[in-house]
Image: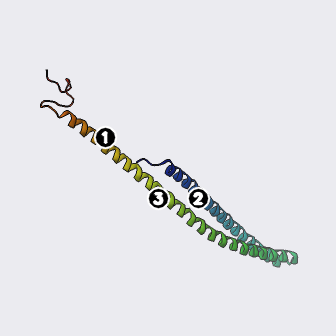
């Protein structure tokens, strides 16, 4: 019994679905990395704002202090929004990861069935070949002195 064309096509479809799930997972991971980089920049903006406040206090410039305070406040606010988005993206990543693993398991199970069917077909073909050889050999075991492979085809001269 050979592996059916439908099973091979199913394996191809499952492989494509697995790849699509892998791409979605990588996309979410990239988004999380970008959001993490944004959080780091927000931290730098907040430190720069605090530094601006210190410089404004030292120089006595009210506008520099206000600008520093506003910069720090906006950085914290943006950081909070980004942190929320990271939490959502991590939740989505977990969902996408589960989907990817489910698809991988499906594909591997199908591949295992295909491999087993191929192995059964090879064993059956080997059995058939051996049976044919046995039948051929038994066909030559007629008269004494008849041997397979003798030049005279089993006839005595």
Q: Crowding at label 2, few (<14), some or many (≥20) Cα neighbours within 10 Å?
A: some
- Look at discs 3 and 1 and give the one toward the viewer: 1
Instruction: Report how far apart the C-alphas of labels 3 and 2 lie in the structure.
Output: 18 Å
Q: Residue at x 76, y 75 (%)?
A: 77
Viewer-proximal residue among 60 and 104: 104
Q: Which marked residue is nearer to the observer: mark 3 or mark 2?
A: 3
Q: Residues within 10 Å of mark 1 (few under 14, many from 20)?
A: few
Residue carrying label 2: 22
For residue 66, what is the image quadrant? bottom right
**On screen, residue 47 above or below 118:** below
Location of the C terminus by quadrant is top left
In space, the residues marked 2 and 1 are separated at their CA atoms by: 44 Å
Residue at which label 3 appears: 109
Q: Give me the residue at 75% from left, 70% from top.
A: 45
What residue does disc 1 label? Answer: 129
- Image coordinates for residue 113, horizontal then vertical, percent: 44, 55
Horizontal side of 140 relative to 31 (left or right) equals left
Residue 55 visible within the image: no
Q: Position of residue 44 (x, y in %)?
A: 72, 69
Whether pointer 2 and pointer 1 mark residues with C-beta atoms closer than 8 Å, the reply is no
Residue 75, visible in the rendered structure: yes
Q: Of marks 3 and 2, which one's residue comes earlier in the chain? A: 2
In front of the other: 59 or 38: 38
Q: Which mark is residue 82?
A: none
Q: Are marks 3 and 2 in contact (CB under 8 Å)?
A: no
Specify which label sits upstream in the sequence, 3 or 1. Answer: 3
**Is label 2 in a helix, a strand or a loop?**
helix
């Amino acid at each position: 019994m050979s592996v059916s064309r439908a099973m091979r096509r199913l394996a191809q479809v499952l492989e494509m679905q697995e790849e699509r799930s892998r791409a979605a997972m990588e996309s979410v991971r990239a988004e999380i990395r970008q959001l993490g980089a944004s959080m780091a920049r927000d931290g730098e903006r907040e430190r720069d704002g605090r530094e601006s406040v210190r410089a404004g206090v030292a120089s006595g410039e009210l506008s520099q202090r206000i600008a520093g305070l506003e910069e720090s406040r906006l950085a914290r606010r943006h950081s909070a929004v980004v942190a929320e988005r990271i939490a959502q993206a991590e939740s989505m990543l977990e969902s996408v990861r589960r989907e990817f693993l489910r698809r991988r398991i499906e594909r591997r199970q199908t591949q295992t069935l295909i491999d087993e069917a191929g192995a059964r077909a090879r064993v059956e073909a080997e059995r058939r070949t051996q049976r044919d050889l046995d039948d051929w050999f038994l066909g030559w075991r007629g008269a004494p002195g008849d041997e397979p492979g003798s030049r005279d085809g089993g006839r005595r001269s």
